[in-house]
Image: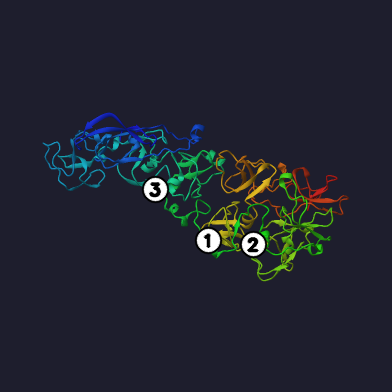
């Protein structure tokens, strides 16, 4: 246990540098040296050379126990003596222990003799015959038996060889600039490295009294794969590097990243943690090594993190809907009607049943321009306000009219009963909500504006969009796989829970939750974000991400609004092009200017996802027709209230600069 530097815990090789004949063993002992490399870990990213290495060096924390002091032989000892013929090893320091200690600082004035067991009072023999009896160390008060010690024959003072050599047991650790010395006895204390209480051996700095680390933390491997210690409950594909601090400036720049295992923050900048140099992946040392019992059981696993184990049977839920839907083409209405195999309605239908003045024609074949964000072409259904991408669908018979409907939207039931928040009265299908300009109303469930079809109660002025009218009682979601998410109503307890997608409180909104975990989602975050989208800013589909992307360690900037964002909030990302977008910015298919993005960045769902813009209207205060659009920065101020028009639903004249709030 000499004063040598702590380096990497790597494999060791026998080097025939020295052999000794020790009194404790009949064979010669050979010196074995640990091969060491400098692994001083900083918070900076490793060199590219190191980043490209995928092989992990298997590190032995120890090679066995010393036969004298019965403590482990660790790599920071740098070398030890071992017998080639049998399983017998000694610390180098134990091998070199003198047979007599003169004027030892713990017992000055008298000579101490190296012995084993309880000693007879016979100073004429250097090694007297032991008496196989228990004795107690005068330093640590531990009762020993058949154990090496230093004994004073004059005053019967005895201390074991561990306590006798404690001042010589030191290490240089890369986390601290002073040499560390071992404490005299085992103790229970708070470890500076991990900020957790530990029992056992500690090393401390004699200069900096506050620095104290447990032996287990001192021996943490400089690099590890997290699935090695956690049996795949939590995993990450890249090597994690041990870092000895998380400076506040860096933590702030990373949007106060949280541990990817326990979801807790990094409260103290000087606490050790493991980090990935290829991704934004950070984890507490205790979480990475599974030293907390909570992480060994999937039942206690935090919501949405690591691997969850299936807690339901498929046969018990035959109609279970799995979110997110694959793309924008599939929605809850299509799921309900197309999958039931109901017959199509052929030919023409009366447009008046949908508050439309013209007949509607069913298009089943032929050349049709569908919704295509890659070509900046928009074709949205007037019923559900979702893209029309396939035949058949209904189109207005008038060439210059943009009224279109999915085929399944023509088969919506005329009324529904026993709705979630309105169970006593029936809700009637209304193609346009009465007394609402351009039919725009606010859905009572998702709290988003809509001008599509609605189910409502005129008596209560209660309206929901057609998607929220068919919200299922139970779903599953990719963000929290294998666990059922139940629809939950607003309550005092739920209102203070945060949605995992947008990080906002659930408030009084309807949502989904996992009863076994602290996992909540707003209904709009759960149901309105597809797994993949297409955007003209990227030739590949962008996928919905719930955590920072792999192999992407740099900052995340939205390609639409050009703002940096927190990648622990849901976002869309293309791994091929390293393109990222806010989930709220991604639906801006036809207006991709920077000024079109919504001002509240914590909103995960585009606030006008249920609004179909377009259409003209005659108003008395202006001679030209005005068009229903979303305001951008160039629109300036409202002609009536002089407030900015950006972000809001407005009426705009394209023949002059007239514009006002809707």
Residue at position x 69%, y 52% in the image = 607
Q: Is residue 391 above or below residue 109?
A: below
The residue nearer to you, when weighing 446 against 320, is 320
Q: Marks 1 and 3, how far apart in space?
A: 31 Å
Res. 51 in view:
yes
- Name which of mark 1 and mark 3 comes first in the sequence: 3
Q: Give x and y (percent) for residue 118.
A: 17, 44
Residue located beneath label 2 in the image = 471
Is residue 155 left or right of 214 when viewed as pictured?
left
Which part of the image, by quadrant, shows the N terminus?
top left
- Are dots 3 and 2 in contact, CB under 8 Å? no
How many neighbours does mark 3 have within 10 angstroms: few (below 14), some (14-19), or many (20 or more)?
Answer: few
Q: What secondary structure is marked by label 3?
A: strand
Q: Give x and y (percent) for residue 342.
A: 69, 64
Q: Residue 515, which numbered label?
A: 1
How many neighbours does mark 1 have within 10 angstroms: few (below 14), some (14-19), or many (20 or more)?
Answer: few
Is residue 653 left or right of 60 when viewed as pictured?
right
The residue nearer to you, when weighing 299 against 411, is 411
Q: What secondary structure is marked by label 1?
A: loop
- Name which of mark 3 and mark 2 comes first in the sequence: 3
Residue located beneath label 3 in the image = 197
């Amino acid at each position: 246990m000499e004063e040598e530097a702590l380096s990497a815990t790597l494999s060791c090789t026998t080097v025939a540098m020295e052999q000794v004949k020790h009194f404790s063993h009949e064979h010669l002992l050979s010196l074995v040296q640990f091969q060491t490399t400098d692994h001083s870990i900083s918070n900076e990213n490793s060199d590219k050379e190191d980043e490209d290495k995928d092989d992990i060096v298997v590190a032995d924390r120890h090679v066995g126990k010393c036969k004298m002091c019965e403590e482990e032989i660790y790599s920071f000892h740098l070398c030890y003596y071992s017998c080639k013929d049998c399983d017998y090893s000694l610390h180098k320091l134990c091998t070199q222990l003198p047979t007599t200690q003169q004027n030892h600082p713990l017992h000055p004035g008298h000579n101490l003799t190296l012995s084993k067991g309880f000693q007879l009072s016979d100073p004429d023999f250097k090694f007297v015959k032991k008496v196989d009896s228990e004795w107690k160390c005068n330093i640590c008060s531990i009762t020993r038996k058949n154990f090496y010690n230093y004994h004073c024959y004059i005053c019967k003072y005895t201390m074991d060889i561990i306590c006798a050599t404690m001042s010589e047991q030191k290490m240089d650790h890369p986390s601290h600039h002073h040499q560390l010395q071992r404490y005299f006895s085992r103790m229970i204390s708070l470890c500076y490295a991990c900020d957790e209480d530990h029992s056992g051996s500690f090393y401390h700095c004699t200069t900096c009294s506050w620095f104290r680390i447990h032996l287990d933390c001192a021996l943490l491997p400089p690099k590890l794969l997290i699935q090695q210690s956690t049996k795949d409950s939590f995993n990450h594909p890249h090597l994690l590097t041990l870092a000895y601090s998380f400076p506040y400036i860096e933590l702030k720049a990373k949007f106060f990243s949280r541990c990817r295992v326990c979801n807790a923050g990094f409260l103290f900048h000087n606490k050790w943690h493991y980090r990935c140099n290829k991704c934004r992946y950070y984890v507490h040392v205790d979480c990475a090594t599974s030293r907390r019992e909570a992480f060994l059981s999937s039942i206690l696993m935090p919501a949405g993190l690591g691997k969850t184990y299936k807690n339901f049977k498929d046969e018990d839920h035959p109609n279970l809907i799995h979110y997110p839907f694959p793309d924008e083409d599939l929605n809850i209405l299509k799921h309900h009607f197309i999958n039931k195999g109901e017959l199509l309605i052929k030919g023409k239908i009366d447009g008046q049943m949908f508050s439309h003045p013209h007949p509607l024609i069913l298009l089943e074949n032929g050349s049709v321009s569908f919704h295509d964000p890659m070509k900046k072409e928009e074709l949205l259904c007037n019923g559900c306000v979702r893209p029309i991408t396939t035949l058949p669908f209904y189109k207005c018979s008038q060439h210059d009219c943009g009224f279109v409907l999915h085929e399944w939207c023509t088969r919506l039931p005329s009324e529904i009963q026993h709705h979630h928040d309105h169970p006593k009265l029936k809700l009637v299908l209304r193609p346009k909500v009465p007394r609402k300009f351009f039919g725009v109303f606010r859905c009572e469930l998702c709290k988003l504006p809509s001008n599509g079809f609605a189910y409502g109660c005129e008596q209560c002025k209660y309206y929901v969009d057609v998607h929220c009218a068919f919200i299922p009682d139970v779903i599953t979601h990719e963000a929290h796989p294998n666990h059922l998410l139940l629809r939950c109503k607003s309550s005092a307890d739920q209102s203070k829970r945060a949605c995992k997608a947008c990080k906002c409180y659930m408030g009084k909104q309807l949502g989904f939750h996992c009863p076994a975990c602290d996992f909540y989602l707003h209904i709009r975050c759960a149901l309105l974000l597809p797994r993949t989208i297409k955007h003209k800013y990227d030739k590949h589909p962008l996928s919905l991400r719930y955590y920072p992307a792999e192999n992407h360690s740099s900052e995340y900037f939205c390609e639409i609004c050009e703002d940096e964002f927190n990648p622990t909030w849901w976002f869309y990302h293309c791994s091929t092009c390293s393109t990222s977008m806010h989930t709220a910015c991604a639906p801006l298919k036809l207006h991709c200017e920077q000024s079109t993005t919504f001002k509240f960045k914590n909103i995960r769902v585009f606030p006008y996802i249920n609004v179909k813009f377009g259409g003209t209207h005659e108003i008395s205060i202006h001679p030209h027709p005005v068009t229903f659009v979303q305001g951008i920065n160039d629109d300036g101020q409202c002609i009536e209230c002089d407030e900015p028009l950006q972000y809001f639903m407005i009426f705009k004249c394209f023949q002059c600069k007239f514009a006002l709030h809707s």
